[in-house]
Amino acid sequence: MPRRVTLIACGAVLAAAGALRAEPPAAAPPASPTTAAPTEDPGKRLYARHCLSCHQADGGGVPNMQPAIAGGVWVKGDPGALASFVLTGGFDSAQRKESAVDNVMPPFAQLSDEDLAAILTYIRQKFGGGASAVDVAQVAAARAKIPR
Amino acid sequence: MRSTSMLQVVSLTIAGVVAAAAVHADDGLVLPDGFTATVVQEGLGAGRHLAIAANGDIYLAGRDGLVAMRDKDHDGKVDETQKFGDVQGTEVRIYKNWLYVSDNVGVYRYPLKKGELAPKGARQTVVAGFPLERQHADKTFALDPKGTLYVNVGAPSNSCQEKDRQEGSMGQNPCPILEKYGGVWVFDGNKLDQTPANGRHFATGMRNAVAIEWNTAQKALFAVIHGRDSIDTLFPKLYNAEDNATRQGEEFHQIVDGGNYGWPYTFWDTKLGKRVVAPEYGGDASKEPEAGKYPTPLVAYPAHWAPNDLLFYSGKNFPEQYQGGAFIAFHGSWNRAPEPQAGYKVVFQPMKDGKPSGEYQVFADGFAGEMEDNSPAKARYRPVGLAVGPEGSLYVADSQKGRIWRISYTRK
């Protein structure tokens, strides 16, 4: 399903270029290749800064230490639930016993709604088969529900 | 094949000191000239430590339980494999006619009887009741010839921050974790049904000494300790990712009665070649602790290599230069990312009279393979356990696919 969503979303852009492929819209050729500066995805940059050493560049995690997130329920599921989990940290109670890991995830409530939205969008698109983006309002709503 | 071996030789030279090395093994493992490796058994799950009885029977501990193996026709391949017991953990050691094993909360033993491969006798509890933790919970141990049991009780923490692994959180001072964890506790390995309260607090300031071993010739305890993680993500104003990947040494120490090895207040900075105060405790990336308070490591190995087993060699098979030296199984890094991962090898540390007598040498390499995406989960193999067989070969266990190799000196 997520793959199909990607195709539809990209269809309009890529069909014009005559290349119907499952690539994110950012891959579409810029209007002027000679002048356009490559802009780094802030989600990718922030993932590298806060998440990568545990979950790794491929989202594969570390055996017995930190779980893989690539292809998992969190990056494909409800954006609000994902935002809530990342804000509060903890062990993933949905994890199967045989894939249990040692390390607990710290909470990331110190990050802004904007930064979290960028990270969560990045991991859903890269590791969740192109799952929907997470917007700032969804992170803010999840934050508002955290008991103080 | 030739280009692969060239690549491996090049990577070895970068990673550490090595003499002539080439592919001399199943799986393309890279060993010093004159040595060969063969696969003894495979498919045993997430293996951890190994022990080998005087008759050559092999015992593997692991997260998937205990396994006993026998090579009946002495061709270097296991012919009989039996799963047994109900202990899932890391350590396995043989003392007299007992197989000592551990899980995250206790140390147990099974009787080893003539003719039995997997022990049939009931499991006895030596010590039980360690608090159940997840982080650094493996209760690895060493036994001396009198049966004194030295248990590594790892700290369930990275650096004893008020909030574990959270950016900027300062260290608890004094660190209350050290009361029950982060050190070695001593028990009588011949006594049953002890609790942690029966243990004597032998040494402290050790984050997690998975690789712990008694040196019979030196009559002394040694350990290689897992250093702390994430100086960059926790204190980004002081350290960058390259610092985190390269500075916190994995410290090799002789562990003495009453010793304090500096965790969580300090770590050995391999870039500066000195002990520094941890950032959680007011460190500024170069500030030193009070002089003489904590010992200098015998050797500090590169950051995050993850020393998971230690063995002093006194077997009959290897050349003279290996006698009395230490083999260390480095499981390989994860916390070096996004910098290149490292470790994933067995190192030989030359030693004389209990002191290092030369630079460490990469002894066995090539376990991890290409390791696509710099991802530990994609390592082919990760060395985790070591043992010496009665013939003097070195056995190495892997945690990725549950493979065991036998490395022998085969030059005539």
Image (tube, coloured by chain):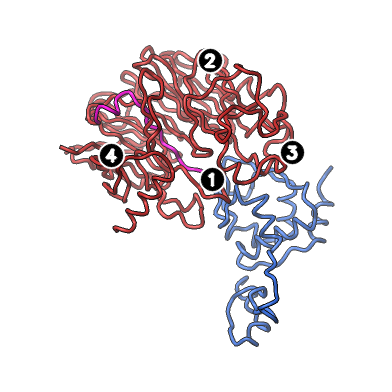
Q: Chain of mark 3?
A: B
Label of residue B202 in the image: 2
Q: Chain of mark 2?
A: B
- Estimate how packed mark 1 is, as few (under 14), some (14 to 19) or many (20 or more) residues with alpha carbons within 10 Å: many
Q: Quadrant of residue A134?
A: bottom right
Q: Position of residue A22 (x, y in %)?
A: 59, 76
Seen in the picture, residue B69 relative to B152 is either above or below; the reply is below
- Residue visible at 42% across and 38% down? B384
Which one of the lettered chains is coloured red? B
Say whether marks 3 and 2 touch (CB < 8 Å): no
| Dot 1 and dot 4 within a common chain | yes
Label of residue B168 in the image: 3
- The magenta region covers B319-334
Q: Quadrant of residue B262?
A: top right
Comparing labels 2 and 1, the label whose residue is closer to the camera: 1
- Precedes in sequence: disc 3 or disc 1: 3
Q: Quadrant of residue B54?
A: top left
Comparing labels 3 and 2, the label whose residue is closer to the camera: 3
